[in-house]
């Protein structure tokens, strides 16, 4: 595969700090972080890292034991609420 070299100018200082921090946290090079970001933006990055619970939507499985345990938590103890 042919490799192309880019030169990027006028990177805001905050963006630079964030990218360098990510590289440090991932224990990888700044170049690797930038290549991953470019690949994701171009739609070539494969799986997207999610930081939310969207991946769980529509995957609920009915579990009567879990429902019973949750239902028991909804019972108010009258002695405690006097």
Image (cartoon, rainbow, N blue to C red):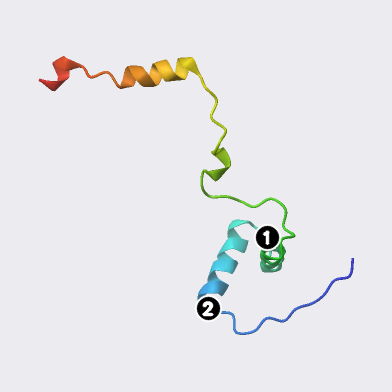
Q: Element under label 2?
A: helix
Among the 4 quarters of the image, the one containing residue 32: bottom right
Q: CA distance from mark 2 to mark 1?
A: 20 Å
Residue at 48 percent across and 15 percent down: it is: 64
The residue tagged 2 is 13
The picture places residue 4, in percent across and down from the top left corner, at: 82, 75
| 78 in relation to 8, above or below | above
Which residue reaches farthest right? Answer: 1
Label 2: few (<14), some (14–19) or many (≥20) C-alpha neighbours in 10 Å: few
The residue tagged 1 is 28
| 78 in relation to 53, above or below | above
| 8 in relation to 70, above or below | below
Disc 2 or disc 1, which is closer to the eye?
2
Residue at 54 percent across and 44 percent down: it is: 54
The picture places residue 11, in percent across and down from the top left corner, at: 59, 80
The picture places residue 42, in percent across and down from the top left corner, at: 71, 65
**If the image is split into quadrants, where does the N terminus sit?**
bottom right
Residue at 58 percent across and 62 percent down: it is: 22
The mark found on residue 59 in the picture is none
| 15 in relation to 53, above or below | below
Q: Earlier in the sequence, mark 2 or mark 1?
A: 2
The picture places residue 5, in percent across and down from the top left corner, at: 79, 77
């Amino acid at each position: 595969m042919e490799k192309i070299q880019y030169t990027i100018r006028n990177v805001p200082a905050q963006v630079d700090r964030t990218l360098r921090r990510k590289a440090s946290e991932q224990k990888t090079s700044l170049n690797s972080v930038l290549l991953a970001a470019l690949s994701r933006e171009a739609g070539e990055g494969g799986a997207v890292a999610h930081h939310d619970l969207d991946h769980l939507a529509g995957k609920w499985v009915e579990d009567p034991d879990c429902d019973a345990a949750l239902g028991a938590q909804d019972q108010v103890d009258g002695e405690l609420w006097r």
